[in-house]
Image (cartoon, rainbow, N blue to C red):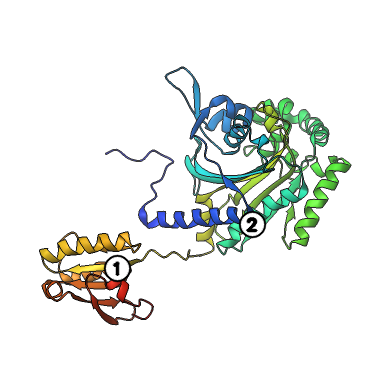
Amino acid sequence: MIQIPRGTKDILPVDSIKWQYIEEVLRETCRNFNYKEIRTPIFEQTELFVRGVGDTTDIVNKEMYTFTDKGGRSMTLRPEGTAPAVRSYIENKMHGDPNQPVKIFYQGPMFRYERQQKGRYRQFEQFGVEVIGVEDPLIDVEVISLLLDIYKSFGLEKLELHINSIGDFESREDYQKALREHFAPSIGEFCSDCQSRLDRNPMRILDCKADAKHPLMTTAPNIQDYLNESSKAYFEAIKETLTNMGIDFIVDPNLVRGLDYYTHTAFELMSSAEGFGSITTLAGGGRYNGLIEMLDGPNETGIGFGMSIERLLLALEAESIELPIDDSIDFYLVTMGEKARIEASIILNRLRTNGFSADMDYKKRGMKAQIKDADRKKARYMIVLGDSELESGKIHVRNMDTRKEVEANLDCFEEEVNFDEA
């Protein structure tokens, strides 16, 4: 039997309605913040991710789904959303748009070949936002507050916002020099990945899971000690504004972004709910002041975040939150006899055309079984249609909650009945 690929998951109708609800909340939140949707291809040139994500990352080195197309070109299923969004920004000359900064959001499947864990799949759904064209502590705060608004709108409370600053390019250079001096004497004790990163990108060593418990990790230099005055002022402005907004946060010196183009603000949102799991991160983001130029674009700056829908669902489960989803239908037509079934299909078409949701039985089951089916489908109103109703042109519309019935004309009952009272 052909089975689903490892690391992927079918989203069945009982669950897809939750996804639809979440997606609408995400879109509504973005509308409130005046962010517009961007849609990019599922696959891109491999070079985009090698340059845009970084050739020292596990994503590029170990996790990408890469293939050669019929033209001999190397293509990759997108592993994340920022690089494609920036590529589109450059290619479509969005820096010339009169509406600046460019504020966009995206949502779609991403692909990473990694070990499947709870809430982590090889195909996963990512939502993210990007703001390109301005460097301002206030826009950094806006992006962070948008992220928090999303999670809080679902009723989540067990949330921790971790923030940090990795400073400007000058501060980063000083910090990386200190890291090289710190790790170099014992780098032979670290994994091969860390050894290769020492000269190229020592900040990536701090993200290593294999060597996370090495003693030098806990004594590594603190980025806060290497921020210059302008970087300190930028970070202080962010902390002050968050505080004035009533947003709690934790300054986490271990939170860094190791890629060459990340600067200033880094942040992660974590779940503190009991039983959520060992990997507590729900979403992460930061400011990138070199990525656009690295991809041959103009000298512009950006900030954004990415979040997994699957992990959002896990957070809801951990806090025992039920989404307020209405999956009921307006009408269910119970039929008796073939003539009634044919007439019911015509009535269904009329109801649906007029904006009502409606259904009927197609398996020719008995009346009791149809009534049970109406209950399963959570019908608000039920109509029984048989020979007598067809002859008289009169029907009874039953409210399935109150069991109250109202008589109406068959050919226009949806116009006659006051459904608030029925």
Query: Mark 1 belongs to which amino acid?
Result: Phe
Alpha-carbon span between mark 2 and mark 1: 39 Å
Residue that label 2 marks? 148
Element type where label 2 sits in the image = helix
Residue that label 1 marks? 331
Q: Is residue 361 visible?
A: no
Which of the two labelled residues, at mark 2 and mark 1, occupies the earlier sequence position?
Answer: 2
For the C terminus, the quadrant is bottom left
- Point out the frontmost of discs 2 and 1: 1
Q: Nearer the viewer, residue 417 or 157?
A: 417
Answer with the quarter of the image where residue 54 lies.
top right
Q: Locate residue 27 relative to residue 340 in the image: left or right.
A: right
For the N terminus, the quadrant is top left
Q: Is label 2 in contact with label 1 (beta carbons under 8 Å)? A: no
Measured from the top left, where is residue 33 in percent x and y? Answer: 63, 54
Label total for image: 2
Identity of the residue drawn at 68% across and 32% down: 291
Q: Nearer the viewer, residue 24 or 198?
A: 24
